[in-house]
Image (cartoon, helix red, strand yellow):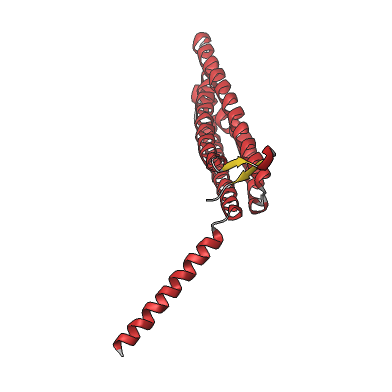
Amino acid sequence: MPSSSASRTSLALLLLLCTSFAAQAAEATPEAFLATHNTEAVRLNQTAMGVLLGWAVLNMGAGTAGHFTTEGERRAFWQANAAWNVVNLAIGGFGLYGQLTATPETWDLARSLAEGQKMEKLLLLNAGLDVGYVAFGGFLLERGLRTDSAQLRGWGRSLLLQGGFLLLFDAVLWGLNWHLNSQLTARLVPAPHGVGLLLTWP
């Protein structure tokens, strides 16, 4: 009897194992890979927009408090932080809405590639603008020091902080998107007769 029981248990485990492998094989298709890839990309950018919104809210709150509790250069610094992040709040809000309403599981290969390239280009453009913000902040700070203007110094320090944060944010997010997109493009091969691209598997 013990031997018969052990045999039945082994058979049940074997069937369970085969069922599990069959389920994994069913999921391991180009379509499933593409849907997973797109969902990960959207989730990544949702998280990033959440970080940007958090930064904006933090700076608006701290900037408003600083406006009422400080004077001179520090007051100008906090004022500029609060004002600057109204824009970040709008960008983060619209960006998060766009990611939350996306339907990545329905994107075909062409749409997936287009969305990935669009995000990378947008982040590179933003990074270029961020460099400009940092440079302008340095200009304002230098001019404030030269003319003994507390307001210009405060604004300059604020732009250096905000531009520096955005540059780091956009650079890191670009790197993460590039890495994710490269996993997709690494699987592409020319279609038969050289017309279009195909997703290889595995």
Residue at left 63%, top 34%?
87
Please tell me whether residue 99 is drawn above or below residue 123 in the rendered image. Answer: below
- Residue 202 vs residue 127, the one in the foreground: 202
Horizontal and vertical percent position of residue 114: 66, 39
Look at the picture and state if 13 lies above or below 28: below
Could you tell me which residue is drawn at 57 percent across and 23 percent down? 133
109 vs 36, left or right, is right
* Placement of the N terminus among the 4 image quadrants: bottom left
106 or 59: which is nearer to us?
106
**Which residue ends up furthest to the left in the rendered image?**
2
Q: Residue lying farthest front?
A: 193
The location of residue 197, given as percent across then percent down, is 65, 41
The reply to whether residue 85 is visible in this rendering is: yes
Depth check: 28 or 116 in front?
A: 28
Q: 145 or 46, which is in the foreground?
A: 46
The image quadrant that residue 3 belongs to is bottom left
Q: How many marks?
A: 0
Q: Is residue 71 left or right of residue 199?
A: left
From where the camera sits, is residue 86 visible? no
Residue 39: percent from left, percent from top: 58, 51
- What residue lies at 54% left-to-right and 27% top-to-bottom? 163
Quarter of the figure with residue 44: top right
Counting from the top left corner in percent of width and height, residue 177 is at 54, 39
Residue farthest along the bottom direction in this orientation? 1
